[in-house]
Amino acid sequence: MRNNLVNTTTDMKTITHFEEFDTSNPAGWEEYSERLVFFLEANSIREGPRRLAVLCSVCGPKTYSIIKSLTSPDPPRLRKHSMKNHFMPRPSEVYQRFLYHRRLQQPGEGVAAY
């Protein structure tokens, strides 16, 4: 097992490792972001620019590429974008209405009953 602690002072330790986000499991973004918040708090990182820098350095190349494309043409530090909206978008209201109101003829159901 890898040692994830670095001694910064005699009585305080900093956690140095945080795994990258698995883009093949977009539903895992919410859990990943919650764990990232704990990681940032454990390392006393409270300022916005520094938090973004940590996210961009630990999230992995695929996730960083997504962040960069979502904030394009500006660099990520100049724009705010919710990664949750990208990985877990809200369902389309129009499509949800369509699903609710559609009626399909069941097997064996006559035209008159349909």
Image (cartoon, grey):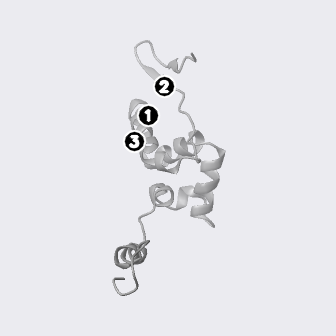
Residues under numbered marks 2 and 1 in contact, where contact means CB atoms less than 8 Å apart = yes
The label shown at residue 39 is: 1
* Numbered disc in front, either 3 or 2: 3
Residue closest to the eye, 65 or 95: 95
Callout 2 amino acid: Ile
Residue closest to the eye, 46 or 94: 94
Callout 3 amino acid: Glu
Secondary-structure class at tag 2: strand
- Give the quadrant of residue 95: bottom left
How far is mark 3 from mark 2, CA to CA?
16 Å
Residues under numbered marks 1 and 3 in contact, where contact means CB atoms less than 8 Å apart = no
Specify few, some or many for label 1: CA neighbours under 10 Å numbering under 14, 14-19, or 20 or more: some
Viewport quadrant of the N terminus: top right
Residue at point 57% right, 38% down?
Answer: 20
How far is mark 1 from mark 3, CA to CA?
9 Å
The label shown at residue 34 is: 3
Position of residue 41 measured from the top left corner of the image (x, y, whole percent): 38, 35
Position of residue 89 measured from the top left corner of the image (x, y, whole percent): 45, 62
Q: Earlier in the sequence, mark 3 or mark 2?
A: 2
Residues under numbered marks 3 and 2 in contact, where contact means CB atoms less than 8 Å apart = no
Residue closest to the eye, 39 or 83: 83
Callout 1 amino acid: Phe
Residue that label 2 marks: 15
Residue 56 vertical placement versus 1 (above, below): below
Secondary-structure class at tag 1: helix
How far is mark 2 from mark 1, CA to CA?
8 Å
